[in-house]
Image (spheres, rainbow, N blue to C red):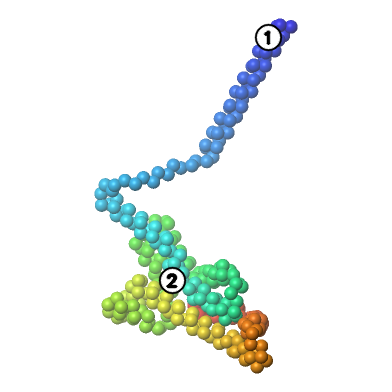
Amino acid sequence: MLLTGHFGSVFSQETVDRTTTTEDKIVQAVNTQIDNAINIPFIDLAVRPANDNKEVSLSIQILILLALLTLSPSLLILTTPFLRIAIVFDFVKRALSLQQVPPTQVMMGVALFLTMFIMWPTIQEVNDKAFKPFSAGEIGLEEFYTNSVGPMRLFMYNQMKGEHKNIQLFMKLRGLPKPANFSEVPTYVLIPAYVLNELTIAFKIGILLFIPFIVIDMVVASTLMSMGMIMLPPVMISMPFKIILFVLVDGWGLITQQLIAGFS
């Protein structure tokens, strides 16, 4: 019995050792697979004094690039049809006396997709002339910038429909001579001129949208006053009639059609 107990304890110890060794091997194999599957890079953002003018120039270029990335949403809004579409949609909500319906996020989403629909030919041209050649290493950074800005400049210039008073205004404010052709207009002059042109067109469309709904408001207000119902807000009565009229004439379809046609 003593021998049996001795050998039993030895066998038990060997079994435990083997089990422990097997578990260690399994854990090591799993860790090795994880290390091979997930190669997490080490990122070191070191700040040190520049050694020469080249490093100083590179640091300035990085700062300018970060600033442009921060301002890129504003630049895209101001140089695309998004500005006009968003303002017109806001006018529609105000003309219908609607404050929360449709939600602002929904209206901005619709404006964004309409902007992409209108700008798609320009986006394809920029992709073919700038992004693809630059990715293939066929052109440099300067030519990439020129090929990217060119289609955008042409798009903004075409939306002015021959009315160049805004361009002349900013050229005069900058003290520049009158341009003989489109290529002589600087980009920093063309962008604010385009923004003013879009604001003007959007407000003109907004005025036209307001006229029929103002008539409805006046008729409802006059009717309520003649009936002696002065304490009843006219907006509460006129809003359903506005919505009914807007739906019957397919307001969203007409507005979308006219907006897209205005950029063709």
Whether residue 46 is visible here, answered yes or no, is yes
The spot of residue 175 in percent (x, y) is 27, 77
Q: Disc 1 marks which residue?
A: 6
**Residue furthest top as drawn:** 2
Residue 105 appears left or right of 247: left
Look at 36% across and 55% down and name the residue there: 62
Residue 22 appears left or right of 186: right
**Residue furthest bottom as drawn:** 226
Question: Eyeballing the image, is 203 above or below 59?
Answer: below
Whether residue 128 is visible here, answered yes or no, is no
Residue 72 appears left or right of 37: left
Look at 60% across and 87% down and name the residue there: 217
The spot of residue 21 in percent (x, y) is 60, 23
- Mark 2 nearby-residue class (10 Å; few <14, some 14–19, many ≥20): some
Look at 42% across and 61% down and name the residue there: 70
Q: Which mark's residue is nearer the viewer, 1 or 2?
A: 1
Look at 55% across and 76% down and name the residue there: 89
Residue placed most toward the observer, 207 or 187 = 207
| The quarter of the displayed image where residue 30 is located | top right
For residue 79, the mark is 2
The spot of residue 184 in percent (x, y) is 32, 75
Q: Quadrant location of the N terminus?
A: top right
- Mark with earlier residue (1, 2): 1
Question: Eyeballing the image, is 42 above or below 20?
Answer: below
**In the image, what residue type sits under mark 1?**
His
| The quarter of the displayed image where residue 65 is located | bottom left
For residue 232, the mark is none
Query: Judging from the image, what secondary structure is the residue with disc 1 in?
Result: helix
